[in-house]
Structures are given as structure tokens and as C-alpha cells.
Image (cartoon, rainbow, N blue to C red):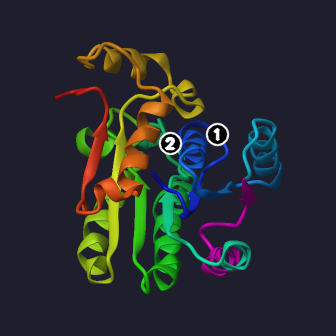
Amino acid sequence: MLEGKVAIVTGGTRGIGYEIVKKFLNNKAKVVLFGSREESVKKAVSSLKEEGYDVFGLYPNLSSLDEVKNAYDEVINKYGKIDILVNNAGVSSATPIEKYTEEEYEKIVDINIKAVYNCSKVVVEYLKENGGVIINTSSMVSIYGQPSGVMYPASKYAVNGITKSLARELGKYNIRVNAVAPGITETDMVKNLPKEMIEPLIKTIPLGRIGKPEDVANAFLFLASDMASYVTGEILSVDGAAMN
């Protein structure tokens, strides 16, 4: 479904991002995964290569426009183009507002909002000539909020706003911009959240189970492919109808 395409996946070293990388590779895309640390990128690339995949990894600071630009230039030098950007890098939070620190606030804003802005801003110059796709990772909490950790849903509300606005702004260049809003999914991020937050939410899922990373990756594949050629500005929920 993605043969001949070149994709960048931020936050591609584990969880949903890692599954997106594999899904894209299995559909014949050339994929560059971005991670936050050299060691995590090397580990992910090594693991994928052991499975027989040809993949490339980089670790720019996504809150720096210059580092993002330099990383994209490396991708262009290697593959000649960029067709798909997946803004998946993110951090969660369950901190009560009275205990929030300025450092935690700034970390969430830098990774969950500024990185999406930076990566999207820089990629546009590469996509304008031939069109392309930007897909952002949102969350079910961007729709329903959550009972603690206010800046995480706030950041995902921002991602939805970026998605819908850029879809309108960039449509004239045949650049589609969508987001996927996963529900509770079997990832390290979710495993780190307290049980008292997760267990009541599972009871709200009509399908009766937590989502798997592949469930979410399938949505990214659809939106990245030509099957979604007339889909833009959408926030696609993949949550088993949780809280509906």
C-alpha cells in the first residue's frame, strides 16, 4: 500500500510508533524512525534489522527547528524525498495539578506540541511540490479529558487543532493532514499509568478489551495510503467505542 513512499516516524523506537514503522515497512515503504536517544534508536534499528527489515534511524531534538531540518536533510540525502510524516513522539502525564512542576509542564509542551509544530513546519517545504501526508498521534483524552495529568489532554487538544487547521491550510498543495486518537492501548506508556486510572476506563470499552498497537498502526496505514486520498482534517478514533 505504500510502495515507493518514504516515511518518517517520530517516536518510532517502541510501542505504537514501533508498530507503525513495522506496518509501513511491511507495505513496502522506506522508513526512517526518529527517537529521543541514540541508544534507543540503535536498539530499535538493530531489532528491526534482525527481523529482516531495511530501516534507518536518527535522534534529533524535535523541539529544535535546526536539528529537525538537519535530520530531514539526511533523509533527503539518503532517499531523495519525503512523502509521509508521522508525528508520534509524545509523553503522558498523570500528575495532579497541585503537584505539577514547571519542568513537567514544559516537557509536555515541548514534546507533544512544539515537536509536532516543528516537524510539520519543516516537512512542508519537502511536500509542497508533489503532495504528501502528515499524520499526528492524538488520544482519546483529547475528546474526553482525563481525571489527572491535565497537560496531557491539553496537549492532545492542541494536536487536534493543529491537524484540522493544517488540513485547511495545506490542502492546496495536495498535502493531507489527519490524526489518529488511540484509546487505551498495550504500550509502555499505559503500563506506567496507575491501575486506579486504567481499570475504570477498561469497563467503558464496549469491545471489552484494551487495544493492541497493531490496531492503531492499521489506522495510520490507511491514512498514509492512497485509500484515504480524499480524507483530510479527520481525527480518527481507534478506541473500541470507549466512553461513547
Question: Which residues, given as a range, are shown in magenta?
Answer: 55-72
Q: Nearer the viewer, residue 74 or 203?
A: 74
Circle 1 residue = 14
How many tags in the picture? 2
Instruction: Give yes or no for residue 66 being in the magenta stretch.
Output: yes
Q: Looking at the picture, how far across and down is residue 36, in whole percent?
A: 70, 55
Residue 10 lies left or right of residue 152; in this view the side is right
The residue type indicated by label 2 comes to Ser
The residue type indicated by label 1 comes to Arg
Instruction: Give yes or no for residue 54 being in the magenta stretch.
Output: no
Quadrant of the rendered structure where residue 10 is?
A: bottom right
Q: CA distance from mark 2 to mark 1?
A: 14 Å
Circle 2 residue = 92
Q: Residue at x 23, y 28 (%)?
A: 241
Asked whether residue 60 is in view, the answer is yes
Which quadrant does the C terminus fall into? Answer: top left
Crowding around mark 1 (Cα neighbors within 10 Å: few <14, some 14 to 19, many 20+) is some
Q: Looking at the picture, how far across and down is residue 154, in whole percent?
A: 35, 52
Residue 13 lies left or right of residue 220; in this view the side is right
Relative to 198, does residue 123 appear above or below in the rendering? Answer: below
Q: Residue at x 53, y 47 (%)?
A: 27
Relative to 43, does residue 66 appear above or below in the rendering? Answer: below
Crowding around mark 2 (Cα neighbors within 10 Å: few <14, some 14 to 19, many 20+) is some
Q: Residue at x 39, y 56 (%)?
A: 225
Relative to 127, does residue 240 appear above or below in the rendering? Answer: above
Q: Nearer the viewer, residue 11 or 49?
A: 49
Residue 242 lies left or right of residue 51; in this view the side is left
